[in-house]
Image (cartoon, rainbow, N blue to C red):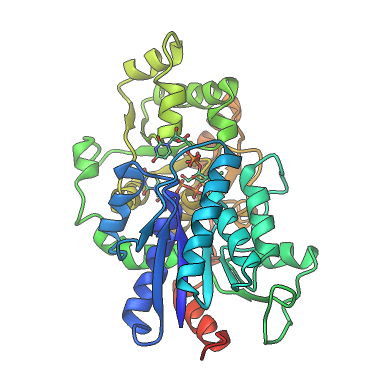
Amino acid sequence: MKILTIVGARPQIIKAAALSRAIRNHFAAEIDEIIVHTGQHYDANMSQVFIDELEIPAPNINLNIGSASHGKQTAMMLQGIEDALLAEAPDFLVLYGDTNSTLAGALAGSKLRIPVVHIEAGLRSFNKSMPEEINRIMCDHASTLLFVPTSAGIRNLEKEGFRTDNTAPYSADNPGVFHCGDIMFDNLVHYSRISEAKTGIINSLNLTGKQFILCTIHRDNNTDIPERLHSIFDALITIANNNTDIVVPLHPRTRKLLLDKTGDGISTRLSKNHRIHLIPPVSYLEMIALEKNASLIITDSGGVQKEAYFFHKPLVVARPETEWTEIIENGAGIIADADESRIVNAVDELLNKSDLQFPEVFGNGRAAEFICNTMLSHSARI
Ligand code: UD1
Ligand code: UDP
């Protein structure tokens, strides 16, 4: 069986690592994987570092699309992915998550009638002003196999008319919907033991033995709306002034809008605050070392929200809503949006709770094997 995998943005490279590892370890004789990188993320610390560190095979094709407006970026990807699909004629096109690379893949594959496999299907924010919400809905509805990480994802799909009792042969009109756990959890199970041994990030930040908060911010409605961006970083300044160190690996989008603008008071106040560590994006192993050692995580990232839960860390969500509703329902996280006082109060509340619960909601860490076995059972070629 031949599959063609699309990656483009940082979290997709990380998710793809789990599937590539499962193929290498368990299905090398049965599955041939071609990797196409759209080039949506291209800085070394947003792309190549993950390919090297997570031992993903070098992408067979790099479309080198880079940054552009949504329409232009998606259109260029669509053209490049279509060419790759025509040249490779895979049995399945494998897509991750909800980025523009995902959307371009879904359009290209479904129009060529190549069965689309969507990993991380079914997630919804019910907020269509998010570009990701449009991308994931379109991708789910063009897919033949949908791999859903959570029960909430299954319920969302059922509300849109998907059925979990469809039987093979599957097609875009009769898709197979599988609740399989979260493929990011596979990675954590695999890498969490070696992350600290492999990295000196905690030492290099002089945080060994100290309590600190980890924060990542990159959503467009946080970075591109100055009031929201400033409100979040004002909250960090207030928390830091209460003798708490905060580590913030800055996504390039956030760095540009927060620091590279001249005449903006917040960047001066941040650079003067010695408890706020603004650092470039870190590698995956460094990131999970930071997550494991943090006392609390503040984020608007999808992946980092889940990783907080995997590591049993209290979570403050700097968004108006979340797709990972189980975290909030279990009381392990609070939605604080981009509101300075809500963020400060949520941090205070969660750090003072001693009885947080983290029941298992993301599967058993073997989602990638399940996905490979399911594709093999339903490949037309086998
Ligand atoms: C994208 C995804 C988002 C995902 C995030 C993961 C879409 C619509 N958004 O958001 O769902 O959560 O990736 O990180 O697909 N830039 C660089 N260097 C890079 C990459 C980006 O400087 O290597 C800067 C550019 O100024 C670019 C901006 O970041 O315009 C935004 O990049 P883009 O890929 O369009 O969106 P993200 O915000 O990264
Ligand atoms: N991540 C990383 N280095 C960083 C920030 C994040 O390795 O500096 C990892 C993080 O551990 C998670 C993934 O990137 O596995 C999440 O990606 P991101 O937040 O960019 O996107 P999202 O999940 O919101 O789509």
Q: Is residue 307 visible to us here?
A: yes
Q: Is residue 305 above or below residue 358?
A: above
Outermost residue toward the bottom in this view: 382
Would you say 66 lies left or right of 82 here?
A: left
Q: Out of 223 and 115, give the one closest to the viewer.
A: 115
Which residue is depicted at the point 29% across and 49% down?
286
Q: Is residue 312 visible to us here?
A: no
On the image, the x and y values in percent for residue 192 come to 32, 61
Would you say 316 lies left or right of 167 here?
A: left
Q: Out of 60 and 27, give the one closest to the viewer.
A: 60
Which residue is depicted at the point 19% across and 38% down?
204
On the image, the x and y values in percent for residue 230 come to 52, 21
On the image, the x and y values in percent for residue 25 come to 32, 80
On the image, the x and y values in percent for residue 371 come to 51, 77
Q: Out of 185 and 329, give the one closest to the viewer.
A: 185
Would you say 32 lies left or right of 347 here?
A: left
Which residue is depicted at the point 32% across and 29% down?
277
Q: Is residue 52 above or below residue 75?
A: below
Quarter holding residue 115? bottom right
Which residue is depicted at the point 56% across and 31% down?
222
